[in-house]
Image (cartoon, grey):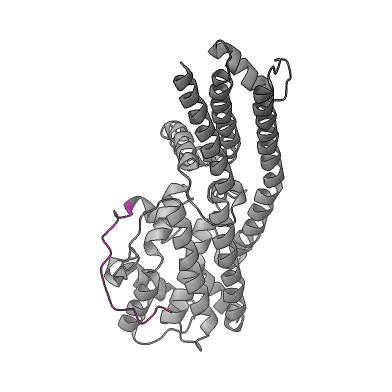
Amino acid sequence: MLALRVLVFLAGVLLVAATLLSAVRTFVLPRGVSDRLTAAVFRGVRRLFDLRTRRVKSYADRDRAMALYGPITLLTLPLVWLVLIGAGYSGMDWALSLSSWTDAIEQSGSSLFTLGFASIGSLPRALVSFSEAMIGLGLVALLIAYLPTIYSAWSRREEQVALLEVRAGSPPSAPELIIRFGRIGGFDRLPELWATWEAWFAYIDESHTSLGVLAYFRSPSPNRSWVTAAGAILDSAAMVNAAVDIPHHPSADLCLRAGYVALRHIAALHHIPFDPHPEPSDVSVAREEFDGACDRMAAAGVPLKPERDQAWRDFAGWRINYDEVLLGLAAVTMAPEAPWSSDRSHRRTRRRKPRARREKKSSL
């Protein structure tokens, strides 16, 4: 019997330690580290939401349902942690000579939620109870402290997403952004736009990997999404580099590089498969779609480069760097339909085996 109690006590210690490590990885560690327990909670809550969204037919209803996914998952995490810590301490309390599991659960619950209705007894049980009370308060304080941080990061992200509607329409698209800048004679302001979004990509790279739940916090408007905004900006920079006959500015290259690096880091955190060395021929945008966009821009007076074939190859060379991760993120976040991103996310291909290839000319 003594050996059994020792094993149960050690199992309780390991369960509490693993739970605390999960909380630290999720909220405290300032880097994108995937945690199995947190990922399991995300998957479990997502399955419940999928049952709901399968029954709705309109995107508006699906968006209203999915708007709750991020906040509910965020609140579910500390509840799961508290339950596991309570279970671990129940085992430790039982191992410290309590007569029944009912008494152990009551002792653990009294300490975890600082209710104080159960007697502590011996010094070892008192030390265990004090540590449990401290952990319970700490987890609640951790959630309260990080809620302002999460919503501050969300607000900062959404500011640029909202401003993009003025520049690229709703839903945003690369041809529309280029046409609008051409209409107002604003091509000389494009380097400023690329620099702003380069900083935005760097910000979401840091915030959406250290606080993974942010990826599932939706925009206030159902027609906006941080994923489709990212796709529109990257396509705009790629199309300007490839097809628009204006002086090249390196800020577009830097924006593209910052964008696809950020999207790849976020996709990796959420276990979205992608080929790190894809071929331009695998790009999801068809040549006909690219030609149609170019024809639309030409009709609006945008100066285009004469070599359309070379323009297509250059565009595909840029697009392939972020194509698969863009579609994957659009799929998992159920982004609203937008050209060249969420409108084809359901066709995202399965992960391909990485192949050794020479570095592309368009990569930095």
Residue 30 coordinates in the image, percent (x, y): 59, 56
Q: Is residue 294 magenta?
A: no
Q: Quadrant of residue 315?
A: bottom left
Residue 226 coordinates in the image, percent (x, y): 54, 57
Along the horizontal axis of the image, is 176 left or right of 342? Answer: right
Query: Of 363 and 176, which appears nearest the observer?
Result: 363
Whether residue 266 can be seen here:
yes
Instruction: Report the number of numbered marks.
Output: 0
Along the horizontal axis of the image, is 128 left or right of 261? Answer: right
Residue 14 coordinates in the image, percent (x, y): 50, 35
For the point 47% across and 60% down, which residue is it? 265
Question: Measured along the vertical axis of the image, is residue 304 above or below residue 121?
Answer: below
Along the horizontal axis of the image, is 205 left or right of 276? Answer: right
For the point 57% across and 71% down, which residue is it? 198
For the point 58% across and 42% down, which residue is it? 23
Query: Of 28 and 16, which appears nearest the observer?
Result: 16
Question: Measured along the vertical axis of the image, is residue 171 above or below residue 93?
Answer: below
The magenta stretch is 347-364
